């Protein structure tokens, strides 16, 4: 199987640098999705890594599906016996929690409900009403956004409340909603999207046997759009690489789009500090721009 012939020199280096921490700096149009897919295929076909020992994580279902399709196309015809897990962060956390959330001893069962945005806004509106707060002064969507932002910063209701009382009356009111919101989620055996990350990180951090199981399973970890990871996602990555550091992250510091959701650009800027033996490869050839230039030229 010829996996490398259609890749340029930097792409080949990114695909074949299999072991240890690797940072791939890849701008738009540099072929990063191709590199990730070929890297997964290379680990399986050339390095003999069992597919189930490979985890690739990205941000959207669309990106995960595209990556799965590319890997399947490259490896078509091989008898693999298992498949790599290519997932979003939230889907990965659901998988972990469905199996082990009861090990947290926090009163949640594995049959927990996941609240989507409409559910969380509805719950927020009900909390505002039951606390006697005016939902015209405190719009449910903006209150829910404030709660979500706090969770993504790693703040729980108690720490948010402690800070809010020194800021202003609006924050103090949001803190009251936050506390009731959390109580009702728990009562309903429900998690919102932010909780999926929070509970998964807490589970891996606090329950050694669960952390060990996933470290044993996922020997090779790939993370796409690393510049958009927040502190919770970074904590999840560190917990999954406790035993080994075969971690490859791909990103571009100039393309962060999730700062409103707590994305921390320092995660990519300090990758070499977090993983001191890291290798850095830059994908500098821009195929997309080249094609655009050719398209324009052909129309002249």
Image (spheres, rainbow, N blue to C red):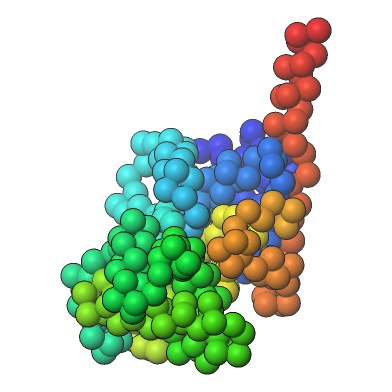
Q: Residue at x 23, y 66 (%)?
A: 113
Q: Is residue 31 left or right of residue 95?
A: right
Q: Is residue 231 left or right of residue 75?
A: right
Would you place residue 51 above or below residue 294 in this image? Answer: below
Q: Is residue 17 visible?
A: no
Would you place residue 264 above or below residue 204 in this image? Answer: above
Give the camera-side residue of 180 and 28: 180
Give percent across and percent down for residue 94: 33, 65
Q: Is residue 143 visible?
A: yes
Q: Residue at x 18, y 70 (%)?
A: 111
Q: Residue at x 63, y 53 (%)?
A: 257
Give percent across and percent down for residue 278: 70, 69
Residue 259: name its quadrant: bottom right
Residue 132: name its quadrant: bottom left
Give percent across and percent down for residue 106: 28, 87
Give percent across and percent down for residue 67: 47, 44
């Amino acid at each position: 199987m010829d996996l490398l012939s259609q890749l340029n020199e930097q792409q080949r280096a990114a695909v074949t640098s299999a072991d240890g921490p690797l940072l791939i700096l890849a701008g738009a149009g540099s072929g990063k999705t191709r590199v990730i897919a070929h890297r997964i295929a290379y680990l399986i076909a050339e390095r003999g890594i069992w597919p189930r020992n490979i985890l690739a994580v990205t941000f959207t279902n669309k990106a995960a599906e595209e990556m799965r399709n590319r890997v399947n196309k490259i490896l078509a015809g091989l008898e693999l016996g298992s498949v790599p897990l290519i997932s979003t962060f939230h889907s990965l956390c659901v998988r972990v929690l469905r199996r082990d959330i009861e090990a947290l001893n926090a009163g949640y069962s594995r049959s927990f409900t996941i609240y989507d945005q409409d559910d969380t806004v509805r719950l927020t509106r009900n909390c505002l009403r039951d606390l006697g707060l005016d939902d015209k002064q405190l719009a449910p969507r903006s209150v829910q956004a404030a709660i979500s932002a706090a969770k993504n910063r790693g703040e729980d209701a108690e720490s948010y409340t402690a800070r809010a009382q020194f800021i202003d009356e609006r924050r103090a009111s949001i803190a009251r909603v936050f506390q009731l919101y959390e109580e009702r989620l728990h009562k309903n055996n429900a998690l919102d999207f932010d909780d999926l990350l929070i509970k998964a990180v807490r589970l891996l951090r606090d329950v050694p046997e669960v952390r060990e199981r996933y470290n044993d399973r996922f020997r090779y970890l790939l993370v796409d759009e690393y510049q958009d990871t927040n502190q919770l996602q970074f904590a999840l990555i560190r917990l999954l690489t406790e035993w080994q550091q075969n971690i490859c992250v791909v990103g571009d510091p100039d393309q962060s789009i999730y700062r409103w959701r707590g994305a921390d650009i320092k995660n990519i800027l300090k990758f070499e500090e977090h993983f001191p033996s890291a290798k850095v490869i830059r994908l500098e050839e821009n195929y997309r721009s080249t094609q655009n230039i050719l398209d324009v030229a052909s129309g002249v």
